[in-house]
Image (cartoon, rainbow, N blue to C red):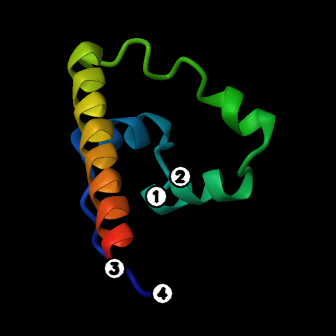
Amino acid sequence: MASVNISIKDDAYRFLKSLKGNNESFSEVILRFKEKKGSKEAIMKYFGVLKDADIDWSETEKRMKRLRESINKRMKENRKNMQHD
C-alpha cells in the first residue's frame, strides 16, 4: 500500500487524534468519515467535539471575514475584467 505525507494544522491533528483508537491508524479514522459521509449519525457523532478546544473563535471569525472580503474583491475585479474583454 502506498502512503502520502500531508500537512494539517495542529487543531486538525488534535481533532483526529482525539477520534483515534489505540489500535487504529489516522487513515482508518479519516476513512470512517468517508464510509458514513452525509449520514445523520456521522454528523451527530462529532457534535460538540470542539466545545472544549482551545480556539480563539473571535480571531477565527475575523480571518474568515477577511477571506470573504478578499474573495469578493477578486470576484468583482474578475467580473470587471471580463466585461472589458
- The part of the image, by quadrant, that contains residue 69 is top left
14 horizontally vs 70: left or right: right
User: Looking at the picture, how far across and down is residue 10, in whole percent?
Assistant: 23, 40
Task: Measure how far apart labels 3 and 4 are at the Cα level.
Answer: 49 Å
User: Looking at the picture, how far across and down is residue 85, in whole percent?
Assistant: 33, 79
Residue 29 badge: 2
23 horizontally vs 71: left or right: right
Rendered residue at 34%/77% (across/down): 4
User: Are the residues flagged by discs 1 and 2 in contact, CB closer than 8 Å?
Assistant: yes
Q: Residues within 10 Å of mark 3 (few under 14, many from 20)?
A: few
- The part of the image, by quadrant, that contains residue 74 is bottom left
Task: Look at label 2 and name its amino acid.
Answer: Val
Give the label, 1 or 3, closer to the camera: 3
- Observer-nearest residue: 67 or 13? 67
Q: Residue furthest front?
A: 84
User: Are the residues flagged by discs 4 and 2 in contact, CB closer than 8 Å?
Assistant: no
Q: Residues within 10 Å of mark 2 (few under 14, many from 20)?
A: some
Q: Find numbered disc 1 in the image and state the secondary structure of the residue it sits on.
A: loop
Residue denoted by label 1: 25
